[in-house]
Structure formats: C-alpha cells, structure tokens
Amino acid sequence: MTGALIATLSTACAVWLWTAPDTPTTRLTRLVTGRDKPRWTSLTTRLTRPTAARRAQLWRHASIELCQSLSAELSAGRTPGEALTRAIASVDFPAAETLRPVIAAARDGGDVSAALTSSAPPEGGEGLRQLAACWEVGVTVGAGLAALVERVASTLRAAQAHRQDVAAQLAGPRTTARLLAVLPALGLLMAAALNMHPLDFLLGSLPGLMCLIAGIALDACGLWWTNHMATQAQT
C-alpha cells in the first residue's frame, strides 16, 4: 500500500514538472510584478500566465489585427501617422506599453520604422518587423502604403494559417510522447498493486538506483527531444 502511495506521488510530481511554468518566465514575472507579492498571488500568476509560445502567438495575432486596422485607416484617407496611432489604440497587444515609442514617433514625425523594429519582441514580432520594412519603403520610395500594409497582412495571415495547420498535425505526436513518458510510472503502480515492491529495488540497492536514474534521464531526454522537434517544425 505504501509503495502504491509513493508511486502515485511520483506520478503527480512528474506531471507537475512537465506542466509547470518555465524558469525564465517566472523570473520575468517577478521583475515585472515585483518580489513583495503574496505567495498565493504569485501562484495564481504562475498558473494563469501565458507561456512563451502563447505570448508569441498573441503577438502574431495582434500584428495581423494592426495591419488590417492600419490598412482600413489609410484607405479612409487619414495620414500615416494618425492612421498608425488609431490602429495601435484599437488593437489589444500582449504588452501595449512596448509600443509607446511607436505612438510617439507617429505623432511627432519621428522614425516610425526604427521604433517598430525596436518594439518588436524576439518571438512573435516578425509582423512588426515586416510592417517596419513596409513603412520604410512607403516613406522612402513613396509607394502606396495602404497596398503595402494589406500585402503584409495577407502574408501574415497565410503564415498564421500554416502554423495552425502544423500545430494540429503535431498534436497527436505530442500527446503520444507524453503518454509514453507516463507509462513507467503506471508500471510502478501496477507492480506495487501486485505486491512486487518495485521501489524497494529501485531505492534500496545500487543497481536499482542506477536503473532509476537512467530511466528518469532517458524519459526526460525523450520528452525534451520530442518537444524540440515539434517546436522546430512550427517555426
């Protein structure tokens, strides 16, 4: 009975370690929200905070909305600076404060292209960088900015549709990999239920401990490699 309880707790710990927020995101949240927050608030933030992949997805979606809104404002006859300011205000960005330099440059006649490039996040900011290049071409060459922005929006929508299709195709392999990673813990549960005392061997002897460490290492490497391949396929 004790072996079954320990195996159950081990399974729960494995699931938590796999689904827990990553360390860089936790550090970033502490820097942004402060370190003097109550513990329950920090826990709630960790559970509801979007992952890095989710933040990149939100930025890509917001970039598409920005291009569409900007194209509509330009087609309505507004000046580029006014159109960009109104378009940014109408879009819900994951971190709207990072676009303040862009709004200031658009209002004051500054370098909007450079502001867009510097405000674009490393992950998910390709839409803003393309818009910056489009803005630079429109200002330098004098090409129709509305048509260029609409072309950028079309490109971003096509790329987003491709990523969603790839993610849907990778959902099955991801689920299979996670299921296979949990099977050793299920094997421990079954062995404990049959009164075979697997933990006595794994934790009570040197060969068992070596088998346990090797199994955990191989399991973790398999999960990491599967996730790495899936992430590379989506980029």
Image (cartoon, rainbow, N blue to C red):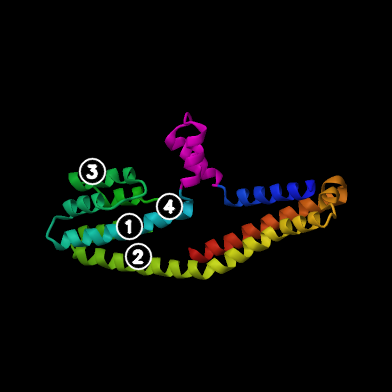
Region in magenta: 21-49
Residue 18 shown in magenta: no
Camera-near label (1 vs 4) is 4
| Gap between marks 2 and 4 measured at Cα | 16 Å
Q: Amino acid at mark 4?
A: Arg
Q: Amino acid at mark 2?
A: Leu
Camera-near label (1 vs 3) is 1
Q: Is label 1 in contact with label 3 (beta carbons under 8 Å)?
A: no
Which mark is first along the chain, 4 or 3?
4
**Number of other residues with Cα within 10 Å of mark 2, as a class: few under 14, some 14 to 19, many 20 or more:** many
Residue at position x 34%, y 44% in the image: 98
Q: Amino acid at mark 1?
A: Ser
Camera-near label (3 vs 2) is 2
Label 4 belongs to which residue?
55
Residue 80 in view: yes
The numbered disc on residue 156 is: 2
The numbered disc on residue 37 is: none
Q: Is label 1 in contact with label 2 (beta carbons under 8 Å)?
A: yes
